[in-house]
């Protein structure tokens, strides 16, 4: 995942209980960190530091929490910009 400025986003707490293609899944309430975001210096927009997911699965859960899927949306702080998926797996589809 990347912020719109090119910073790399990573989950702070991957969910190793549910794996997808051998990789841990991610739960909706867990925040992500954003590293390497330059922000937009020409227009004083600060760099993205964290991201919080706002949508996830509605029927499939792990530990009672929604999972993140390709259609999930996140908002970066402090900028309010979204995260963009770079690589997704297509073997599992969930609602």
Image (tube, rainbow, N blue to C red):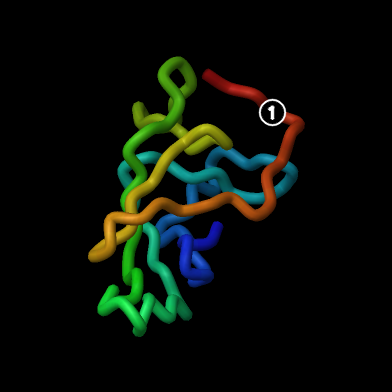
* Disc 1 packing (10 Å; few <14; some 14–19; many ≥20): few
**Quadrant in the rendering for residue 81:** bottom left
Residue 32 horizontal/vertical position (percent): 39, 59
Q: Secondary structure at mark 1?
A: loop
Residue drawn at (30%, 77%), measured in percent from left and top? Answer: 43
**Quadrant in the rendering for residue 76:** bottom left
Mark 1, residue position: 92
Picture layout, residue 72 above or below residue 79: above
Q: Residue furthest bottom?
A: 41
Number of marks: 1
Residue 41 horizontal/vertical position (percent): 35, 84
Picture layout, residue 41 above or below residue 72: below
- Given residues 86 and 41, the one toward you in this image is 41
Residue 82 horizontal/vertical position (percent): 40, 51
Residue drawn at (63%, 42%), measured in percent from left and top? Answer: 19
Residue 31 horizontal/vertical position (percent): 33, 55
Residue drawn at (52%, 32%), measured in percent from left and top? Answer: 71
Residue 73 shown left or right of residue 77 in the figure: right
């Amino acid at each position: 995942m990347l912020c719109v400025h090119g910073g790399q986003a990573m989950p702070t707490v991957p969910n190793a209980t549910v794996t997808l293609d051998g990789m841990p899944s991610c739960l909706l309430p867990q925040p992500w960190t954003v590293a390497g975001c330059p922000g937009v210096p020409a227009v004083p927009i600060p760099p993205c530091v964290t991201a919080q997911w706002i949508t996830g699965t509605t029927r499939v859960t792990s530990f009672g929490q929604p999972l993140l899927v390709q259609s999930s949306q996140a908002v970066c702080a402090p900028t309010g910009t979204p995260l963009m998926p770079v690589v997704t797996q297509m073997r599992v589809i969930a609602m």
